[in-house]
Image (tube, coloured by chain):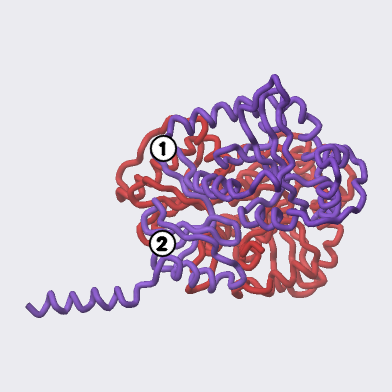
Amino acid sequence: MPYRQYVTRPSGMALGAGFGKAVNVRAALAFALVSGLALSTAQAAEPAADAAARKALQELVPQAKIDKVEQAPLPGYRQVIVGGQLVYVSDDGKYLLQGSLYDTQAKRDLTAARLAVASKEKVDAVSRDKRIVFAPSGKSKYAVTVFTDLDCGYCRKLHSQIAEYNKLGIEVDYLFFPRSGIGTPSYDKAVSVWCAKDRNAAFTAAKAGKDPAPLKCDNPVAEQFTLGTQVGVEGTPTILAPDGTKLGGYLPPDQLLTRLKTLGAPNFAGN
Amino acid sequence: MRLPLFAFGLLLATQVFAATPEETVAKAMATLAPNVKVDAVQESVIPGFYEAIAGGQFIYVSKDGRYVIDGSAYDVANKHDLTAGSRAKARKIALEKVGPEKRIVFAPQAPVASKHTVTVFTDVDCPFCRRFHEQIAQYNAKGITVDYLFYPLSIHPGADKKAEAVWCSKDRANAFTAAMSGADPGSATCPNPVPELTKLAQSLGINGTPTILAPDGTQIPPQIATSPDQLAAELDRLAAASAAKN
């Protein structure tokens, strides 16, 4: 039994077809290693270790857009947030580690925890009027953010159970992530739903397979797609917990509730 | 002279309590995942870390035992995946211990000489394994010997029984080919290496089929391996690369 199943980590999503501009760092690393790509410019006015980390990453993955470089919890290492993923670089810039970093004392997945904080910051910046919100009629116990695509099977399945999620006290805030990318038919549908008079009704109808009447207006769909790539969305649906933890793909209502209840609690043996 | 003596005492104390690499890794993993067996521990080129194999996976454990990284390490300057390199080495060593009597071998026939041997972990009920075997004559024609090791996956119920039945057939190679084209191999039983090979695959972190390994232990991506031409070219390239290293 791999020990992986004992520790809290975002459940992996299968990569669907066509992910727009999302950069998969692992794939890119593998590519860089065989193709030997050129390095680009170094940064100035930073601690030497930060600069070394940037340089290392640019050397291995020139197309990567670095979000942040900071001291890692691990002594002697910097951590780099890039494309919604986290990598560790030795302060001398010689070694790069990618994967999950666990603290055996705190029994925590530090990588997932840091990424959750980064995702939360970004997702919380999206105001409520830019989300399509399905809230319980009573009080919400939890609000999850779900990146969704109108044409994805498990997204539709999730939405077909929206009343059940709500009944359990779970509010679902949708953000659009048309997997095929900006300007594709799925994207156009999302725009049409956004521009409909009754957005929620149009959303539900589209999820049931009814194509929305084509409409255009100012909309946040492209912005949300870009946001998704920055917080590591690799497929749809992607469910984010209130603390930014990526819960993975589709979860039935009762299972989602259980995950939300146990968040933050060390999720080790037996789970 | 007090200070040096005091320092010496400290040094002694740390030595007394210093854990071996094996103990450090075992303790770290015991807190994270008590059921996982640590198979091997060695020094790593990554500063401050040991490299270990636990439950078939490569991990890195900080020398103070506090941190565990489950992932891959890269040498930036050489653009080299260090973990893949270590994994290949471990697999090569393990496979060298698996004798021909535990393999089902499809070798080129004269006048074609065998240039390369690949080891393929396979499952009778895995569609991609079947597709690979459909081309066995072409691999052989390219001078590639294919050594199959049975690795029936638990997602294919009954595949372990089929593997055993194939193994216990009089003409093993023919029974294998027949089963790979969908024929029912029956239900013969006999002493067989299937459970042992399954355990081996798991201990090497192999979790899918077909898994195709080059002679140096490198795992060859399926998109290359499913083309006899590309596989031959890749094996030539790997052989040249390891010749250059030695």
The residue furthest left is B1
Residue B73 can be seen, yes or no: yes
A179 or A200: nearer the viewer: A179
Residue A176 percent location from the top left of the image: 71, 48
Give the amino acid at mark 1.
Asn
Quarter of the figure with the C terminus of chain B: top left
From what the image shows, is residue B14 above or below residue A161? Answer: below
Quarter of the figure with the N terminus of chain B: bottom left
Q: Residue at x 76, y 35 (%)?
A: B132
Q: Residue at x 42, y 63 (%)?
A: B62
A82 or B111: nearer the viewer: B111
Of badges 2 and 1, nearer the viewer stands 1
Q: Residue at x 60, y 57 (%)?
A: B56
**Chain under label 1?**
B
Left or right of B47 on screen, residue A30: right
Residue A49 percent location from the top left of the image: 33, 50
From what the image shows, is residue A250 above or below residue A103? Answer: above
The residue furthest front is B170
Supply the letter of whichever chain is purple.
B
From what the image shows, is residue A215 above or below residue A253? Answer: above
Supply the letter of whichever chain is red.
A
Residue B189 percent location from the top left of the image: 86, 56
User: Which residue is under mark 1?
Assistant: B78
User: Which residue is under mark 2?
Assistant: A74
**Chain under label 2?**
A
Give the Cα distance between marks 2 and 1: 23 Å
Left or right of A99 on screen, residue A9: right
Residue A23 can be seen, yes or no: no
